[in-house]
Amino acid sequence: MAAAEIMREVVVPPRHGSGSDGDERMPSECRAHIWRCLSLDEQLSCSAVSATGRRAAPVVLRLAAIVWRLYTAIVRNELSTRELSSLVEFVATEQKQLVEQFPAVLNLLYSFIRHTKALIAIGQCAVESLAQVLGSTRRLSEVFAQYDCDVARPDVFEPALEALASAVASDVPLLRRTALDSLVGITRSINLGIRESGASTGVGGPWAAAWAERERRREEAKANAGAFNRDPEGWWRQRREARIETDALSTTAALPSSSTSAPSLGPEAPAAASTPSPAATEAAREILELGAQLERGKVGELLCKHKELMLAYMHHCDLRTTALVPSFRRVLRGLSLPGEAQHIDVFCECLGSVWGRANGVDPDAAHIFAFSLVMLSTDLHSARNPGHEAMTYEQFARNLSSALTEGHITERMMRRSYEQVRDGALLEPRSRPGKSGDHGDQTRFAKARARGLRMVRDGALSESRSRRPSTESGEYMEQARLAKACVRLRNALLDPLREGGGVLSPRSEDPGVGSAALLWSGGVDGAPPPHLADLWRALWSAAWAPLLGGFSAGAHAAGADEELLMLALRGLQLGCEVSALLSEADQAQAFSMALQQLASK
């Protein structure tokens, strides 16, 4: 038995899934020390079934273990509401240590809400969990201040309201009612917060300025992304010419006054092969910042046509201390590679250059290694002709070793890369439901479910709640999507650990007025804390449109359901009340018109 397997047997209790360490042959402190010697994946596996592993693990790894248990329940076709509730409770308890991971957890809840037409219980649990996360006046204000008013962090509050509004518009009555009730509760909390803080008086303030800046940047990014998606080549040409002009002006200003020669506005001198130009560096940074707003196929096509831009993009990805396959994944998060062989070769050449120099590997050898992994992925996962045999590790290692000088790529590196590619690490994300990628999703989900059922057979977890829906059912495809959402969250949590970045620690807050940590401190003699009223005004400016949409959708979908109709009516009345408190005439009129339309039905 391998040493890792022996250590794992010591850490994991004899009865898997019991949630406690029943083996008392060794003190828990000793088992914790042994747990720390395991690999990251082994630590994750142990933490999911062992109390010792959970106690020894850092909070991010404990969160990943809970996500792993949720994923396992889904692929085993269990009713996974218990695991989902445990996940949300853990995040709520450890929120101060999970500041950077909190938006990714909410993204998982959004996926569960939007993809649960057949799995109603899971969708309802996700809606209730989201309402729990935003369920108090204090929590609402803190979340909005910490994320939505911070230009360096992703939005949280608005996407949460939009997810709940989408659930109200669903065709599942129970999900509609739960989501609408949650929106009414959030509006009631906003109303209470505005009244307690005195937000009905006064205009402007630092939080309003922060929110306005966030909105300005969002519109600017939207316009920038639109320009890129319309004409990527024109977008890049405009930035390159703007940089040349800026450099020319800087050079002119730096020249002695006696100089009579003007700088040339021609193209820049070519940079070194591995050093991108300043224009390429700035453009690549913009592409990364725009992220999901850009069409991935157009990003890949532009980068493959301009090698300096591809190099700059990869430099921004920071591939130091990262294995090659995770480096592939990191770079490919924001782009799709064109299918042409010359473009794939350009990508592999650039990746080999950047990754090799960052990790002390000969760039030419890294280029060959990268290209061989692409060919391996094609061999293992593409449609095969009858009689085709997938490449084994021995064949892969022999072919790669014959093309490289000895010592460039270690045997351990080759084996680990082969295993990752075999497990689908280089596969492109499949298309949306109903497209040609559905069969690939079903195939990978079937494999994942088979692994889960093997775990049941081996005694890793109980089988008491397992079910087996038909592979043709909507429930089956929904489970596949939820499982993929769990994998995305787990990768987001573990990639910094796997790639040597360590556990992300919460970013320190600005101690000034804009600090969420100071929101509820500083009040004198029972008076509301300073600037809290300003924050509630900014929060309502972000909330009123999604709330109006959710309540209107609930009213139109109510039909003969009087309970749903009354909930929608109450939400619209609260919206009118809050808008009137803040003297927002346009918003009050919008809610009033929705009420009039409801009354005329």
Image (cartoon, rainbow, N blue to C red):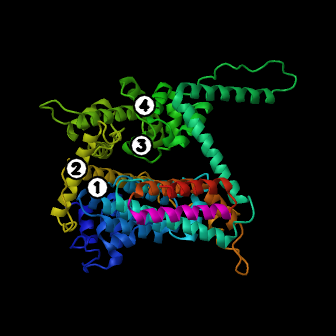
Disc with the residue nearer the chain's start (3 vs 1): 1
Disc with the residue nearer the chain's start (4 vs 3): 3
Q: From the top left corner, tell me how far across and down residue 462 is, in percent.
A: 20, 68
Is 42 situated left or right of 169 in this image?
A: left
Residue at the (51%, 53%) spot, across then down: 549
Q: Which residue is mark 2?
A: 473
Name the magenta segment's main secondary structure. helix
Helix, strand or loop at mark 4: helix
Q: Is residue 70 visible?
A: no
Question: Is 576 colored magenta in this rendering?
Answer: yes
Residue type at mark 1 is Ala
Q: Which residue is mark 3?
A: 327
Quarter location, residue 516 = bottom right
Highlighted magenta segment, given as a residue range: 560-581
Q: From the top left corner, tell me how far across and down residue 323 is, in percent.
A: 39, 45
Residue type at mark 3 is Ser
User: Could you give the CA–CA distance between mark 2 and mark 1, rounded to whole angstroms?
Assistant: 9 Å
Disc with the residue nearer the chain's start (2 vs 1): 1
Residue located farthest toward the right when viewing the structure as drawn: 258
Q: Which residue is mark 1?
A: 118
Is 80 situated left or right of 540 in this image?
A: left
Q: Nearer the viewer, residue 449 or 589?
A: 589
Q: Nearer the viewer, mark 2 or mark 3?
A: 2
Residue at the (19%, 32%) spot, across then down: 384
Disc with the residue nearer the chain's start (2 vs 4): 4
Q: Which residue is mark 4?
A: 347
Do the CB atoms of the residues marked 2 and 1 lie less than 8 Å apart?
yes
